[in-house]
Amino acid sequence: MIPIDCNESVSVNATTRFDKRVTKFVALALVCALWAAFSFCLSTHASEPNWQQIDQWISDLQSLEPGLRENGAKELIELGEKAVPQLVDFYCSSKMSLAEANAAIKAIEILEKIGKDAVPYLLQQLPLHEKCVHPYKLIIALGKIGDPRAVVPLIKLLDNKELNLRISAASALGQIKDPRAVSPLIHALSDPTTGGARRYVALALGSIGDPSALMAIAEKMRDRNIWDAAYDALGMFDFSSEEVREATLTIFEKEHDLSIRQRITELIGKDVIRNSISIKRNSIPFLSHAGGKEGITRLMEISASDEEDLIRRKEAVTALAWIVANRTKTALGVPLKEATATMDLFGEKLLADPSDIIRNVTIVALERIHGVKFNKFSLDIIPYLIAAAKDPTNTLADRFLAITALGHRAIDSDTLAFLEDKNGDLAELKEAPASWRIDEAIAQIQERMIQERIKEGKKKGFKKNSRIKVR
């Protein structure tokens, strides 16, 4: 018999059992690794978009069954950015049959709900808008999404030759409300080539609400083509903002158009306007209705200031004439000192102003004051009107206007001698086509002098038919 070592047998068995365990462990680890790899591949495959499935969901948007349309839209929205390229391609390549048109509108709504992830793809289509049947809906979608990345491309479309694209771009910019769009929109509002889009440009500026656009919008209330849009745009500003209120008050104090002033009053409130120190100081309509020493003095300052805008100077001169003509019929209502100073300002400074606009409005103002019956300044104005008629730097129209004013009110022999031109001051006017105005003024003055002499004769007992010579 062969002897057996028991210790050796136990060792062999232990080694065998250990090897089996290791083998099982390795096999289990390998299975787990293979399962993990399979799961990873499966998840990776699942995360990649199924282009055929996306096409099917887009096709479902054209279905007559509401359930299919709703399910297709839901799946596309959940898929998000991965569905965007095919949705955009479908919209732009659609031939717009009835079913396709409805589906295309639905596709745009889906892109809007996907939101900012759709913006890069929509922006890529803007330079290629000719390929889309209705590209303006892509632009509207960008506006509804409100991503600032779209601002610069949309600004470029404000100059596009197609009206619908200009309108859509303006509306989209108004929805995004980015301050970068304000200046280009103001330019587009004043640019006549913008055409029918200007209404939407005004509304876009109102939607953005930047105070720097208030003046441009207010001015368009004079434009009969877009005044109603400008009216609505003004109402879109936030008048609780101090900056907006101040900008609006500045417009009010410089504005003479009654409709614009009424609109601003509606928006900002009468109390705010009444309590504005700036308006009390600078608003010409306010000053003209206020009258009095302070009103006249401030209007004289504006009229004489070379730093003021010409339009404001012109309005101030007109306001002064209105005050003096209508409130001095009995030397009441206007302080005599200020009224006299106004006449001196007209005659000594404004008739010699470098601006022909100011000279013209001054002559008109003098004629207005001169033409009011019982005005105590009528005789004081005559020397100024004669000077205006003589001045060769005035236009022929202004010189004839001064002569007409003299004919309306003058009643002295000196004025008559001037009009008869014994010194040759009116030689140029007598050669003009309107020279008949000189003869008309002479006839008016002669008639007035005859009437005055008849009155004097009656007082002295002369008969009415007595012959009266007029020099």
Image (cartoon, rainbow, N blue to C red):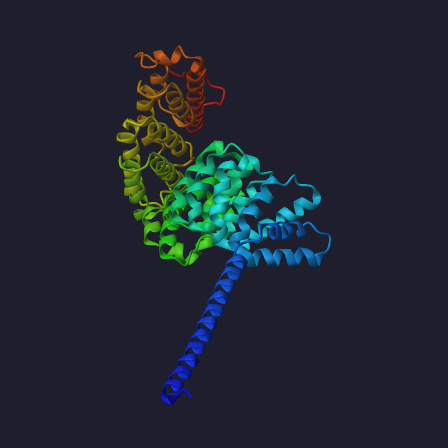
> Left or right of 304: which side holds 11?
right
Judge whether 25 appears above or below 367 on screen. Answer: below
Total residue callouts:
0
Question: Percent position (x, y) of residue 41?
Answer: 50, 60
Judge whether 206 appears above or below 306 on screen. Answer: below
Question: Percent position (x, y) of residue 184?
Answer: 41, 40
Residue found at x 32% / y 12%? 422
Residue found at x 69% / y 41%? 97
Of 77 and 297, the residue lying toward us: 77
Residue found at x 37% / y 17%? 419
Of 308 and 214, the residue lying toward us: 214
Residue found at x 33% / y 21%? 394
Judge whether 71 appears above or below 388 on screen. Answer: below
Could you tell me which quadrant the C terminus lies in? top left
Q: Residue furthest front?
A: 1
Question: Percent position (x, y) of residue 30?
Answer: 46, 68
Quadrant of residue 412 within the rendered picture:
top left
Could you tell me which quadrant the N terminus lies in? bottom left
> Left or right of 71: which side holds 130?
left
Of 361 and 225, the residue lying toward us: 225
- Residue 314 seen in the current view: yes
Of 320 and 110, the residue lying toward us: 110
Quadrant of residue 351 within the rendered picture:
top left
Quadrant of residue 306 within the rendered picture:
top left
- Residue 234 seen in the current view: no
Question: Percent position (x, y) of residue 103?
Answer: 65, 48
